[in-house]
Amino acid sequence: MRVKMPRPKLPRKVCCRPANSCFKPNGIPMSELVQVALEPDELEAMRLVDLEGMQQMQAAEVMGVSRQTLANIVKSARHKVAGALIHGQALMMEKSD
């Protein structure tokens, strides 16, 4: 029996750096909050599609991924952001050097 290995994750082009490393509700200590990690490629995909207004095909080309992969990344990012806003969670972003 052959075990299928997942395909390796291709490197994605990320140009955006977050202004802050986290966003959290005011007045609640970080130690009391659930922390949700927003990956750099998720932030970049949202920037291109939602902020810059690019079509998914164009944004996918910029990031060096397929359109379907970009759609999956955007869906995941939007889910995390909406969940953090609705449930009062801290949204953590990796701050690049």
Image (spheres, rainbow, N blue to C red):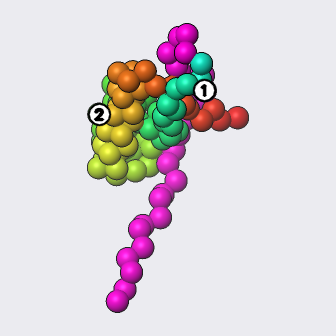
Say whether disc 2 or disc 1 marks the residue closer to the N-terminus. 1
User: Is 78 covered by the magenta stretch?
Assistant: no
Q: Nearer the viewer, residue 27 or 75?
A: 27
Q: Residue furthest right?
A: 97
Q: Which residue is mark 1?
A: 31
Residue segment shown in magenta: 1-28
Look at label 1 and name its amino acid. Answer: Ser
Pointer 2: what residue? 55
The N terminus lies in which quarter of the figure? bottom left
**Dominant secondary-structure state across the stretch colored magenta:** loop
Nearest the viewer among 57 and 2 is 2
Q: Quadrant of the C terminus?
A: top right
Distance between mark 2 and mark 1 Cα atoms: 39 Å
Q: Quadrant of residue 87?
A: top left
Q: Position of residue 16 (x, y in %)?
A: 54, 31
Residue 27 colored in magenta in the image: yes
Q: Is residue 4 above or below residue 17?
A: below
Percent of width and height locating residue 34:
49, 31
Q: Mark 1 packing: few (<14 Cα in 10 Å), some, or many (20+)?
A: few
